[in-house]
Image (spheres, rainbow, N blue to C red):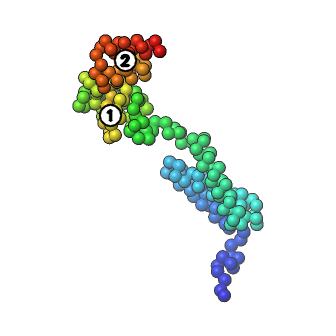
Amino acid sequence: MVPLPLQLDLFGPETLPLLLVLAGLGLSIAEAIAPGAHFVVLGVALLAAGLVGLLIGPFATPFVLGVLVFLFGTLALYGYRELDFYGGKGEGQTSDSAALKGKTGHVTKRVTPTSGQVKLNEGGFNPYYAARSVHGELPEGTEVVVVDPGGGNVITVEGFSPGEDEIDRELARERARNNVDDDEAEREREDAERA
């Protein structure tokens, strides 16, 4: 039987750890060129396992190196998530349109029931949204709260004054939904303040 090239001892015991170091360095360079955490975990895992493999010499069998890659990969992933090197921990990102409900911002282009634009304080990568008002017009600079995120790129907002709190905004939304007359609305506000 003809021996396979790997069985001819063409490669010394340090070859596999050296290959891991080179692959780790290559992925680290790729991460530096195109950041975004695409290669950072695997690059760190391969680099660390390769360096440890070079240190332990003949004990660096493929099985041991595989375990080291897994161990260092787990540690690198944990460190990447906990230390948050790329910043944000998801802040400023919306998971879906429902996450916009209740967000506040201000009008950047006059908002009417048919057109307008707002900038949300925590609106994601691009905080500018096409907006429609619940009722009436909202001039530029008016503070707004999202009452219906829609599901597309058009949200429904209503204005509020800076002194209002969440209870006041919820009462205003409820009044708009139920068309409660002014006397009943005043009684609800008094009840809310007493509670």
Q: Residue at point 60% right, 41% down?
A: 83
* Residue at the disc numbered 1: 155
Q: Secondary structure at mark 2?
A: loop
Q: Crowding near pointer 1: few (<14 within 10 Å), some, many (20+)?
A: many
Which residue is disc 2 drawn over? 161
Q: Is residue 178 left or right of residue 165?
A: left
Q: How far from the left and from the top, in percent, is residue 180?
A: 30, 19
Quadrant that contains the N terminus: bottom right
Is residue 110 among what the camera can see?
no
For the point 39% across and 32% down, which residue is it? 101
Q: Label 1: state its secondary structure.
A: strand
Looking at the picture, does residue 146 appear above or below residue 67?
A: above
Please indicate, yes or no, whether residue 1 appears anywhere in the rendered image: yes
Q: Which mark is residue 118?
A: none
Earlier-in-chain disc, 2 versus 1 = 1
Q: Amino acid at mark 1?
A: Ile
